[in-house]
Amino acid sequence: MYGKKNWVFCDGDLPPKGDNPDFPGHEALMITNVSKDDAKIRIKILFEDKPPYDNITIDLNAERTTCLRLDKPIGKEGYQIPYGQYAIHVISDVPVVACFGRLDVRQTNMAYYSPAGYGF
């Protein structure tokens, strides 16, 4: 069995979109379901200064992957993550693999990097 039922990414902080429409600054959450069973996934957003928002849901079919652009509304509920510091907790009913990435365009030599996540 591959994957974990819980993933936490602590370093969420949406970067500004920047001036180049071809390369807008953003963050993304990628989730892959390698199992033979469909996954029901709940995403909880935790903040520094307010209660968490924990009503984001997605369905991910067996042996499929999805990429959620976090600068756009996500989940069946269409929740828009606000700018500022946050963390993500992914909760799935079957083991999945998740990773998180950020395209930061604040400098001319834009950077794409993937903050580490913790799966359990």
Image (spheres, rainbow, N blue to C red):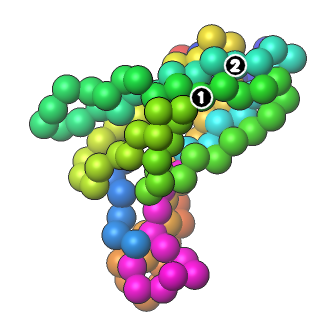
- Ranked by sequence position, the earlier of labels 1 and 2 is 2
Residue 21 lies within the magenta run? yes
Q: Amino acid at mark 2?
A: Ala
Of residues 113 and 93, the one drawn nearer to the viewer in this rendering: 93
Residue at the top extreme? 93
Q: Position of residue 65 (x, y in %)?
A: 75, 39
Of residues 53 and 33, the one drawn nearer to the viewer in this rendering: 53
Q: Is residue 108 visible?
A: yes
Quarter-wise, where is residue 88 in the image? top left
Left or right: 64 in relation to 29? right
| Dots 1, 2 in contact, CB < 8 A | no
Q: Position of residue 106 (x, y in %)?
A: 36, 78
Element class at badge 1: strand
Q: Which residues are magenta?
A: 18-28
Residue 22 lies within the magenta run? yes
Q: Position of residue 61 (x, y in %)?
A: 78, 26
Q: Most prominent secondary structure in the magenta stretch?
A: loop
Left or right: 93 in relation to 109? right
Q: Which residue is mark 2?
A: 39
Residue at (24, 52) in percent of width and height = 84
Q: Which residue is mark 1?
A: 58
Q: Position of residue 46 (x, y in %)?
A: 29, 31
Residue at (46, 47) in percent of width and height = 73
